[in-house]
Structure formats: C-alpha cells, structure tokens
Amino acid sequence: MGCSAPHHRIPPAAPLYPRSVPEVSDHDGELDGLPIFWRSAPAPSELTGAAVPLYLHGVPNNSDDWVRFLARTGGIAPDLPGFGRSGKPGSLNYTIAEYGGFIERFLDQMAIGRVSLVMHDWGGVGLAFAQRRPERVERIVLVDAVPFLPGHRWHRTARIWRTPVLGELVMGATNRFVLRLFSREGNATPGPMPEEWIDSVLDHFDQGTQRAILRLYRSSPPDVLAAAGDGLGRLQVPALVVWGAKDPYVPVRFAGEYARALGQAELLELPDAGHWPWLDRPDALERIVEFVNARAG
C-alpha cells in the first residue's frame, strides 16, 4: 500500500478539460431501447488485446471527464443513463443495482470481455458490476469514489438533494452563478471549478439529469451503500486508490478503507487536491495512465 504524494504540481501540457481530441471518437447507439452515447479510443499498439479500460464518470458529470485519459490509454467511456448525451427516461430508478446491470449489458453489446475499471465519484457503481462478475475485471482505479463501505454520511449538498421538495427546488434553481458558487469547495485550487468543467455540466443539466441525481441519492442511504460493497474482498486484482485529501464530499479516510477492502491496492493520497484531483494535480492523470497502461496483454 502506498502513501501520500509530495506537495507539488505539474502544470498541464494541454487543457485539462478538452471537449474532444483527435484520437477520441464519439458514438451514438441504443441499448434495450435506451439511447446511449460513448467515447472510445484505440489502445496503444503495445497493449492491443489487453483488457479494455472502462471509464465511469460521477455526478453531475459525463464522459467529458475522460477525454484526455482515453487519448493516453485507449478504452471506452459511456455517458451513464441519466447523464450527458445518453437517455434519461423517467421509467428508470437510477439505483446502484440498475447501473451495475447497465454496465454489464453495455459491455456485452460492445463485445468487451475483460476491463480495467476507472471510476470517479458515483462511477463507483462499476463496483456493483465488478463484484457480480469479478472474472471480467483485470484492474481497478478508484478516484474519490462514493464509499460502498460502512460509516459514510452524506455531505451537505447530498442531504439537500435527498430531501423531497427542497431537492427539486435547488435542482431547478441551478444555473451558472449557483454552480460557480457551490463548486468553489470542489477543488483545492483557489476559485470555483474551471469554466470548461462548468460548461460541460450545464450543457446537459436538464430535467432528466436532475431527476436521475435525485433518484440516485434518495435510493442510497448509508446502509444501502455499505451493503453495496459486501463483496469487495472478492476483487483480488491490482488496484489504485487515488484521493484528494481536500475533498469536501467524501472524507479521505475512505481512501484507506477502500484500499484495505480491496486487498491488493496502492493508495495515493494527494494533500493539495480536491474531489476532482486531476484538475488540481495534473500529475494524478499521469499516475492513473501509468497504472492503467500496465495492464496485461
């Protein structure tokens, strides 16, 4: 198990939040009648035939998070149902189990056998798939993920979202000014989140996404979160747990708890990073890319 990284920053060689790069392709399709959007990129030539990196975004984001990662590792990154450019039907419950089933069906439709899972925040729903189908998972990266562990208590914003009527009112009032105000705590770098991050969220923050967020949080009290990680010990694969120690939403202690639960995990705590650590510490992107590209052929 690793330890905290030193206090330093590596300036980005390119924008940290590009909407597209030449190596990454956009796709539209359908899964069981649900419109889906995903991005993909070819693997480096020396890794052709290896497990496919599968990138899963959190709330309130979409696959824009992963463009620079995909360009370096290859792989695939869907917009999860309810987010981005994928379908957002009111008929879905947007639960952990439902997302786990979606991931498995999506991979089956893409004819992808084994994956290296890279998950941020609520992208941790990939763990529901992984625990059910551990033979299909070769590596795991968790980045400031929602704890599928005992003892988590929801942060202030999540408690608002979990409250009927109040959650709907706050969702409906979210605009650029509100998002800039509330996002000031999300990163360690002074100021709100980068404008390109805010643009990406607002471009897709429609009623469907708002409904998906409310249902996801309301279906996930602490006991449900703890039960969702009952099988983490079965995932005996190389893992990397990356955490911004200044994350205001998920306490850093859960980084160590995830690393212990997974058994074969390296822990990288970043003292000067927040909930989206690759934005505060671009070298975190480099470490994740290095780990993912170490996957076996």
Image (cartoon, grey):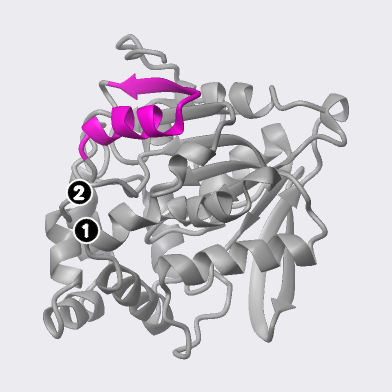
Label for residue 109?
A: none
Residue located farthest toward the top when viewing the structure as drawn: 6
Q: Which residue position is annotated with label 1?
A: 222
For marks 2 and 1 on the same chain, the one whose residue lies earlier in the sequence: 2
Reading the image, the residue beneath label 2 is 152
Q: Residue at x 81, y 30 (%)?
A: 44
In this view, 204 is above or below 196: below
Q: Magenta span covers which residues?
A: 251-270
Residue type at the position of mark 1 = Pro
Q: Where is residue 257 drawn, in percent x and y? A: 30, 32
Q: Nearer the viewer, residue 282 or 292?
A: 292
213 versus 267 height, above or below: below
Answer left or right for 46 relative to 61. Answer: right
Q: Marks 2 and 1: CB-CB under 8 Å?
A: yes
Residue 82 screen position, x and y as percent: 48, 74
Could you tell me which quadrant the C terminus lies in? top right
Q: Mark 2 belongs to which amino acid?
A: His
Residue 256 falls within the magenta-colored stretch:
yes
